[in-house]
Amino acid sequence: MADPELLFDSSFQRKRVNRASKQNLEPHFLSNWIAKEMSERLKDLTRDFQTAFINGDFFDHSIFETSKINTGYFAGESKKNDIACTPLALPYGQNSTDLFLSLTQLHRLNDPKGFLIQALYSLKPDGFFLCAFPGGNSLAELETCLSEVENEIRGGISPRILPMLQKQDVAALMQNTGFALPVIDNEKITVTYSSLKDLIRDIRLIGGGNSLNARNTSYVGRDFFERVETLYFKRYSDGDGRIPVTIDIIFASGWAPHSSQQKPAPRGSAEISLKDVL
């Protein structure tokens, strides 16, 4: 039974991921895009990694077969991974890896800080962490249409889209967890669909869906989604008979603390007054 005090129904999430892993025989295009972007960011680093823990689902593992990584261990909730585990209990020992990668996980966790603590625990000193996940204004168009139609029909709205982490939220999490030199940025992409049905199907193929404990589980009827689709096309159609979807991917990186890393100057050690510069 779901814990009403928690934001997400983790059991329901796992069922979604397992169902998607059976239905989706090919890597998901969004997961692949994220994995490729992460791989490109690793190439910008001036060091290689002997061991990497790569956590996530529904992406082509060969993307991380790069000269930067000597040995990669893939873990996640789907059956396509080498190691089956949930983000709540990672099977890694202390100081056991040089690199920790997390794909599309942080946004759907009841305890994102706990996940980050586990990741930092597993990293060797001066080890590197990089994660990416949908956040910011992702699915804003869909959320707007769902809310307006539900409010019109029922006189109120229920939570249907996951609350998205913002960059400032992630920055605070990284700092509070203890990562050194954290960097947070984002990339916006737009995907178009010919129907609302195709959009919803695509969300499910990546293991997504409404996993909020506060979700309304009553049947809303086919008419509800027909009206949502009509509003979506009326307000956002691109003119070619397709509807756009904004995906805001947040990237967060940081290092396990090490004595060789740069550190901020001690407070009050500045030799030039700011007022002299301005």
Image (spheres, rainbow, N blue to C red):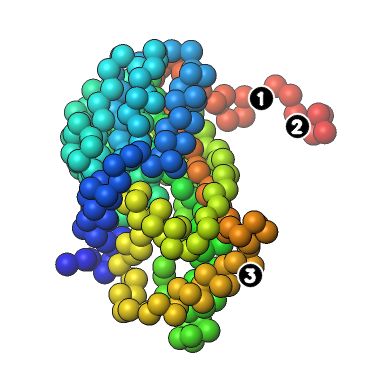
Query: Residue at coordinates 30% horizontally, 46% vertically from top-left?
Result: 24
Residue under label 2: 274
Q: Nearer the viewer, residue 65 or 215?
A: 65
Query: Residue at coordinates 22% horizontally, 27% vertically from top-left?
Result: 94
Mark in front: 2 vs 3: 3
The relative height of residue 176 versus residue 273 in the rendered view (above or below) is below
In the rendered view, does 248 fall on the left or right side of 9?
right
In the rendered structure, which amino acid carries the disc numbered 1? Ala
In the rendered structure, which amino acid carries the disc numbered 3? Lys
In the rendered structure, which amino acid carries the disc numbered 2? Leu
Residue 266: x percent and y percent? Answer: 55, 26
Residue under label 3: 234
Residue 120 visible in the displayed image = no
Residue under label 1: 270
Quarter of the figure with residue 105:
top left
Label 2: which secondary element: helix
In the rendered view, does 92 fall on the left or right side of 123?
left
Residue 21: x percent and y percent? Answer: 25, 46
Quarter of the figure with residue 82:
top left
Residue 23 visible in the displayed image = yes
Q: How crowded is mark 1: few (under 14 residues within 10 Å), some or many (20 or more)?
A: few
- Of the residues under marks 2 and 3, which one precedes in the sequence? 3
Mark 3 vs 1: CB contact within 8 A: no
Q: Which of 242 and 131 is in front in this view?
A: 242
The relative height of residue 274 versus residue 168 in the rendered view (above or below) is above
Mark 2 vs 3: CB contact within 8 A: no
Quarter of the image with the C terminus in it? top right
Quarter of the figure with residue 47:
top left
